[in-house]
Image (cartoon, rainbow, N blue to C red):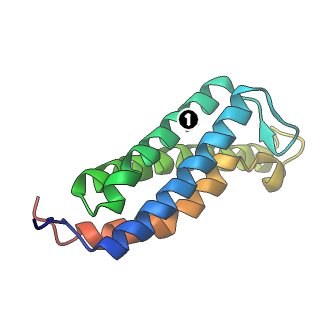
């Protein structure tokens, strides 16, 4: 009995492992945010934490499909990457707005490190996986 795979199993396992790590990381940060945060590093944010748990679930749902080399897993991966980008860019824009408020004199102080949220850091960690997913999907005819 032959198994058909949509892409190479080695690439799938690599991307699946990376997606699993990102999923666990998003889940951990989301749970910490829902439970009230961890001091200055992870702020308490109920809805932000729940959104991160959804991102984690999206990544983790695709892990098995990626390990098997199926496009179904790649679909979940792309969904997780899209959600990561949405929340990462959103918090980057908020950071930029805070900086602009400081430059305009509306805010008394501004610190990039204080305004940098974990969503932005994990978004930057997901970029290598986005490149790998793009490399797999650029040859697909839509």
Q: Is residue 23 left or right of residue 63?
A: right
Image coordinates of residue 33 in percent, x first then y, are 71, 33
Identity of the residue furthest to the front in this view: 1
Image quadrant in which you'd find residue 139: bottom left
Quadrant of res 66? bottom left
Name the side, left or right, on which 73 lies relative to 81.
left
On-image quarter of the N terminus: bottom left
**Residue that carries the numbered disc 1 in the rendered image:** 53
The quarter holding residue 61 reads top left
Residue at 32% across, 68% down? 134
Residue lying at 15% horizontally and 65% vertically, measured from the top left = 3
Dot 1: few (<14), some (14–19), or many (≥20) neighbours within 10 Å?
many
Give the image location of residue 46, x and y in percent: 66, 24
At which x and y percent is residue 130? Answer: 42, 64
Q: Is residue 6 in view from this perspective?
A: yes
Return the residue nearer the eye: 58 or 97.
58
Residue nearest the observer in this picture, 96 or 4: 4
């Amino acid at each position: 009995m032959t198994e058909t795979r949509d892409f190479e199993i080695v690439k799938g396992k690599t991307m699946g492992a990376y997606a699993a790590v990102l999923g666990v990381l998003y889940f951990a940060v989301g749970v910490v945010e829902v439970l009230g945060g961890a001091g200055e590093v992870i702020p308490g944010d109920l809805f932000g934490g729940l959104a991160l748990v959804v991102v984690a679930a999206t990544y983790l749902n695709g892990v098995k499909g990626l390990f098997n080399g199926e496009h179904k897993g790649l679909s979940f991966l792309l969904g997780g990457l899209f959600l990561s980008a949405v929340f990462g860019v959103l918090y980057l824009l908020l950071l930029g707005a805070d900086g602009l408020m400081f430059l305009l004199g509306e805010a008394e102080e501004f610190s990039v490190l204080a305004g940098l949220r974990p969503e932005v850091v994990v978004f930057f960690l997901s970029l290598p996986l986005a490149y790998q997913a793009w490399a797999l999907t650029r040859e697909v005819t839509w």
